[in-house]
Image (tube, rainbow, N blue to C red):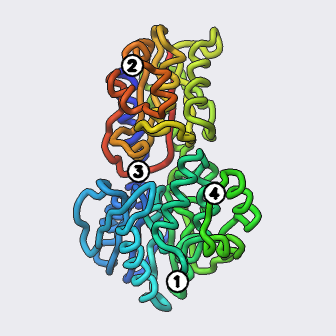
Amino acid sequence: MRQDAEKMIKTIIAENLPQKAVENALRGRPLGSSVYMIALGKAAWTMAEAAAGFLGGRLKRGIVVTKYGHSQGGLPRVDIYESGHPVSDENTITATGKCIELAESLGEGDELLFLISGGGSALFEKPLEGQTLEDIQNVTSQFLARGADIVEINMVRKRLSAVKAGRFAKLAAPAEIFAIVLSDVLGDRLDSIASGPAAPDLSTVADAKRVIEKYNISLTEAQQKYIEEETPKEISNVETVITGSVRTLCESAARAAEALGYTPHILTTNLNCEASEAGRMLASIAQGENTFAKPCAIIAGGETVVTLKGTGKGGRNQELALSAAKGIAGMDNTIIFSLGSDGTDGPTDAAGGIADGKTAALCKNIEKSLANNDSYNALKEANALIITGPTGTNVNDVSVVLCR
């Protein structure tokens, strides 16, 4: 069953790489003979490679901004920058400045191909006047530590940015923008994916204030002022296509499971709760008698959260897997894995975790590890980490229960 899970993981990632989706989107909306390109996010390099190959000599200049370690080499006529994620850093500011220079150089009749994937909120940033990079970092870190989901986080930080909430599209006007988006946000909200640099903002001042109050977020005086200001609600120079999402991730998991002899059941594509709770829930499904005819694969896609209470190392998929390991301890013919499609789960080199009935016994103190948010070290001790390296895609997370 471990081999089955590993085969599924490889298939899931391979089927969700964005090259074909980008090429199909470009065929569906022909561009002219002079095209500029900006690619943002964890999948930026892979998307840009596909676009550059498709466009050939029509590509005049491009910029890629991606996470450290996610670039796979040079591309013709493309400048590549790597920067901080999930918290912006100095390289973020530098790379974003280059993108702004390119956007502001465009004029009437120019075309900008804008390739957007998850992670862009941290990788693409210019603080509005009166703020420092440290101010932005502080807000993001507060949200991450308190278990906020990505839509909530982006409701606030887009209001503090000169390039989020459609503001970047306005900088590029009057040039026309064709945006190809790889979604890592539940519901595929364009204003939340990378904080919507080329999309009108659907959230309001009241929404942002509610989130700030909910998580007790501290803001500077300048930031409080910007929270009171409304964001752009209309963008006229952008056409957008969404090319992938968590649903395609779950469908890939279902096909892979069926090919291995398991009857697949997609439980949800909107898993959105504490990672440890999700792990307990999936373990309880595995424990249930006659709920699903075996052999079966129960699939849940989405993005869980972790409220930090300890000082350990891990990510949401690892925490889910470790929690599930506790629930299926001693069980035979059961395995549960949870995978971040981008190959990086939290600030670690793991994509997620995988657990069977023996995993909990191989961890020295599973309760202590969960309490300390130390899923990485616990799973490493049990040889239960999923290591893929950066995959070149980012369409959220998938968790799978395999039962025989």
Q: Please give the name of the residue rendered at 56% of the width and 30% of the height, measured from the top-left corner.
A: 276
* Residue bearing the label numbered 3: 393
Front of the two marks 2 and 3: 2
* Residue bearing the label numbered 1: 171
**In terms of sequence position, does the residue under pointer 4 or pointer 1 come before the other?**
1
Q: CA distance from mark 2 to mark 3?
A: 31 Å
Q: Secondary structure at mark 4?
A: loop
Mark 4 crowd level (few <14, some 14–19, many ≥20, 10 Å Cα): some
**In terms of sequence position, does the residue under pointer 4 or pointer 2 come before the other?**
4
Label 3 sits on what residue type?
Answer: Thr
**In terms of sequence position, does the residue under pointer 1 or pointer 3 come before the other?**
1
Tell me: residue 339, above or below residue 35.
above
Q: Secondary structure at mark 1?
A: helix
Tell me: residue 338, above or below residue 18.
above
Mark 2 crowd level (few <14, some 14–19, many ≥20, 10 Å Cα): many
Front of the two marks 4 and 1: 4
- Residue 386 position, x and y percent, is 36, 32
Is the N terminus in the top left, top right, bottom left or bottom right quadrant? top left
Label 2 sits on what residue type?
Answer: Cys
Q: CA distance from mark 4 to mark 3?
A: 31 Å
* Residue bearing the label numbered 2: 363
Front of the two marks 4 and 2: 4
* Residue bearing the label numbered 4: 217
Label 4 sits on what residue type?
Answer: Ile
